[in-house]
Amino acid sequence: MAIHDTGAADRVSPQKLRKPYLLSTAISSAGLILSLYLALLPPPTFCDISSFLSCDLVLSSPYARLGGIPTATLGLGYFAAATALSPLASKSKRASKTLLILSIIAVVGVAALVYTELVLIGAICLLCTAAHLLGIAVFAISLMGFRSYSA
């Protein structure tokens, strides 16, 4: 069942929103694949460069779980939802708003995870950082897309 708003679609050209949300879909899909990898497979050896750049240190730390749920699984859930919502957001202000709210929550989570890596663990996971950057990119696109509905 598609979500459609009346009025908002009349003010915004679907063509104007299609490309950014297509990019958001691609970025979200990449984040989904990366999060799936992080959730299911051990960290690759190339990711352990030093004691500061170490996926293994980060992913094996007690902070790698939130309420017993691996943080990579939380990322997987976010990117799955963003992948599903992004194509709908080009056609629906409601879907655009939902994606934006979800992305704001994700960016707050990213900030907390980066703090945890830098301050509490003292190491950075390069693959986690890539996932964080993908999440921030989806947020930026969703913010611009939602603002286009309001313009």
Image (cartoon, rainbow, N blue to C red):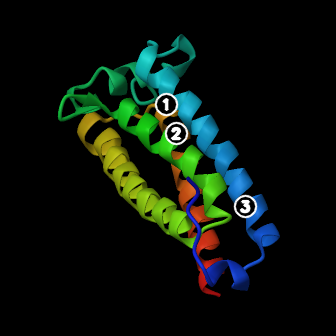
Q: Which residue is mark 3?
A: 20
The amino acid type found where label 2 is placed reads Ala
Is any part of residue 50 visible from this angle? no
Q: Which residue is mark 1?
A: 35
The residue furthest front is: 1
The amino acid type found where label 1 is placed reads Ser
For disc 2, the neighbor class at 10 Å (few under 14, some 14 to 19, many from 20) is many
For marks 3 and 2, the one nearer the N-term is 3
Front residue (pair 76, 34): 76
Which residue is located at x 62 percent, y 57 percent? Answer: 88
- Pinpoint residue 115: horizontal percent, then vertical percent: 32, 48
The secondary element bearing badge 2 is classed as helix
- Pinpoint residue 55: horizontal percent, then vertical percent: 43, 24
Kindly indicate whether the residue at mark 1 contacts the one at mark 2 (C-beta within 8 angstroms): yes
The amino acid type found where label 3 is placed reads Pro
Kindly indicate whether the residue at mark 1 contacts the one at mark 3 (C-beta within 8 angstroms): no
Marking on residue 131: 2
The secondary element bearing badge 1 is classed as helix
- Pinpoint residue 43: horizontal percent, then vertical percent: 46, 16
Which residue is located at x 62 percent, y 38 percent? Answer: 29
